[in-house]
Image: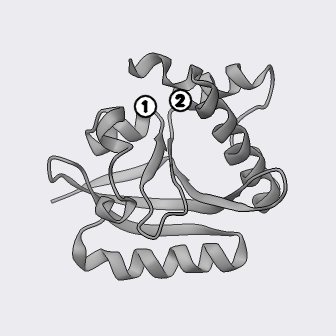
C-alpha cells in the first residue's frame, strides 16, 4: 500500500541514512528533521520534490522513490523497486548519467545535474538542478546513492 511504505522499519532506517548523508555532504537538510524518524519518513514520502535512491549492486536497483518519484516515473512501488536505476534514462543518455554518478561517488555529491529521463510509459522529461549524493551508513560505509530534484519539464 503506497501510502504506508514510509512506515516499514527498513525504509525508515534507510531514509535516516539517506537524510544524514545528504546533510553530511551538502551541509543542508533535505527537509526539517523535526519529530521522530517515522515522521521524517512520512514527510519525505509526501514531499513535493522527487527523491529516489539505489543500492550498491553491480547494476544498482532502485530501492526507494517517494510519491513524487512514483508519479513522475509512472510506476508502482513494486515496479520501481525492481528497476535497475540505469533504466530511468534512455540508452543514449546513460553514459552521461554514469559520468555524473561517478563524480558523485568520488566527491560525495554532485549538485546542479541536468539530464533527460524517461517514465515507464515512455514519457520523456528534463530533470533540472538535481543533487546526487552517496548514501553511507553510521560507520561511513557506502550503501547507495540518492538523488533529489524539484524541477522537471516534459520533453516532446
Q: For residue 115, what is the image quadrant? A: bottom left
Quadrant showing the C terminus: bottom left
**Residue visible at 58% across and 20% down in the picture:** 7
Q: Earlier in the sequence, mark 2 or mark 1?
A: 2
Find residue 29 and name its label: none
**What kind of element bears circle 1?**
helix
Label 2 SS: helix
- Asked whether 89 or 9 is in front, the reply is 9
Q: Quadrant of residue 132?
A: bottom right
Question: Where does the image place residue 88, in percent across and percent down from the top left?
Answer: 32, 59
Q: Which residue is mark 1?
A: 67
Expressed as whole percent of the image width and height from the top left, the position of residue 75 reads 27, 38
Q: Which residue is mark 2?
A: 45
CA neighbours of label 1 inside 10 A, class few (<14), some (14 to 19), many (20+): many
* Rendered position, 89 above or below 64: below
Residue 134 vs 46, above or below: the answer is below
- Viewer-closest of 150 and 96: 96
Look at the numbered discs 2 and 1 and tell me whether their residues touch, using CB distance below 8 Å. Answer: yes
Amino acid at each position: 500500500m503506497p501510502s504506508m511504505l514510509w512506515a516499514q522499519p527498513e525504509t525508515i532506517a534507510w531514509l535516516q541514512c539517506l537524510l544524514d548523508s545528504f546533510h553530511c555532504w551538502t551541509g543542508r537538510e533535505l527537509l526539517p528533521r523535526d519529530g521522530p524518524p517515522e515522521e521524517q519518513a512520512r514527510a519525505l514520502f509526501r514531499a513535493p520534490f522527487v527523491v529516489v535512491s539505489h543500492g550498491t549492486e553491480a547494476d544498482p536497483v532502485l530501492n526507494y522513490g517517494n510519491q513524487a518519484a512514483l508519479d513522475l516515473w509512472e510506476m508502482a512501488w513494486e515496479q520501481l523497486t525492481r528497476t535497475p536505476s540505469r533504466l530511468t534514462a534512455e540508452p543514449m543518455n546513460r553514459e552521461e548519467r554514469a559520468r555524473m554518478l561517478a563524480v558523485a561517488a568520488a566527491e560525495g555529491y554532485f549538485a546542479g545535474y541536468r539530464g533527460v529521463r524517461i517514465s515507464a510509459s515512455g514519457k520523456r522529461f528534463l530533470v533540472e538542478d538535481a543533487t546526487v549524493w552517496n548514501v553511507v551508513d553510521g560507520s561511513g560505509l557506502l550503501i547507495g546513492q540518492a538523488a533529489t530534484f524539484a524541477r522537471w519539464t516534459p520533453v516532446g
